Image (cartoon, helix red, strand yellow):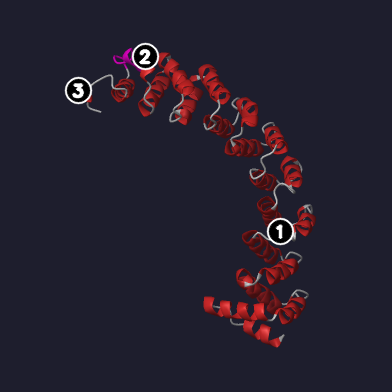
Amino acid sequence: MTNVLERLTDTNTPDKRKEVAEYINGHPDEFDNVLDSIFVSTSNNTMQSKQRILDLIDLLNPKIAIQVIERVIMDSDSNIKVRGLQAAYRTRIDSLNPKLIDILVNSTEEFEVRKWIIHILGSTDPVSYGRILRKTARDKNEDVNLRKEAVFALTKVVDDETVGTLCALLGDANVEMRESGAWALSNLGIRESINCLLAALEDESENVRDWAIRGLRDMDDAKALQGLADTMARVPPSEQVRMIRLVAERRSETILRAITELLGSEDVEVLRVAAWAIGVSPYPPAVPALRNLREHDDDQVRHYVNVALARSGDIDTADLQL
């Protein structure tokens, strides 16, 4: 025992840490006795020993690393717990997951501890632990930040139950949870979420609407794109401007046709952005509508119209100062 403890006092350089880790890996029984002595004490010296052991965790063989983390996650100091959980996350250790569940459901536990448990469950076995991740995400009595961490973990679980949970979050009273739900569905990009994202286009939060737009925009799905086009046609001008900017680079016939129709708007800002969008994604069927705007009173409208016409091959750029 003395040899291990003495060696732990000198782990200040990478070479020294490697040397000590190699000794521990070669003397597992001795190290096991050291662990038993260290993790039953709360003295300052013992706390330093715990920190030094955690400095070595990535250099220890998996069996010994698990023995360390097993003790660390039951430690009374939350900082020690977090370091051990971070090591478990890095090494994808999943054998301790049942014990982690017991810690997670303790609402008095530190947020950082519970957060890292969420990430371990989501990265090692998201399917088996999808139920508790969904429960955490839906729990209105739970810390909103932990609920958001659970939503992030659920993006690794693509199934009907997860989609149902994320869609339900779009109706949550907490705007942060609606934003997280829309973000997650946007990242999943699956057809089953289309109706939820279309409904989210009417949310009072711009962030929710933006994530819904991005999610629908990035799907290669006619229903999603047509839903965006229909919404763009009926929302107020300020919202049309925001939508155009978000979908402009989506070279879709459905989207470009919807933007072309907005070239007949009476709102100057809508005209500017719609003409700019056609310049970004040239669309020959828009040329007649663009020509009608070449003599528009607004300088910016005329500029973007000329750029769009030039990029559509309708006018000679030599005659323009673009």
Task: Name above or below for residue 43 compared with residue 259.
Answer: below
107 or 309, nearer to the observer: 309
The circle on residue 39 is: none
Q: Residues within 10 Å of mark 2 (few under 14, many from 20)?
A: some
**Residue found at x 72% / y 46%:** 127
Residue 101 visible within the image: yes
* Apparent side of residue 251 relative to residue 146 in the rendered image (left or right): left
Measure the C-alpha gap from mark 1 to mark 2: 61 Å
- Indicate whether residue 293 is drawn in magenta: yes
Q: Secondary structure at mark 1?
A: loop
- Cβ–Cβ under 8 Å for marks 2 and 3: no
Q: Amino acid at mark 2?
A: Ala
Query: Which image quarter holds the C terminus?
Result: top left
Mark 3 or mark 1, which is nearer to you?
A: 1
Q: Amino acid at mark 3?
A: Asp
- Total numbered badges shown on the rendered structure: 3
- Cβ–Cβ under 8 Å for marks 3 and 1: no
Q: Amino acid at mark 1?
A: Asp
- Cβ–Cβ under 8 Å for marks 1 and 2: no
Residue occupied by mark 1:
94
Residue occupied by mark 3:
319
**Residue found at x 67% / y 43%:** 157
Of the residues under marks 1 and 2, which one precedes in the sequence? 1
- Give the percent coordinates (x, y) of residue 274: 41, 22
**Which range is magenta?**
287-297
Residue occupied by mark 2:
289
Q: Secondary structure at mark 3?
A: helix
**Residue found at x 34% / y 13%:** 288
- Give the percent coordinates (x, y) of residue 63: 70, 70
Residue furthest toward the bottom? 2
- Give the percent coordinates (x, y) of residue 132: 76, 46
Mark 1 or mark 2, which is nearer to you?
A: 1
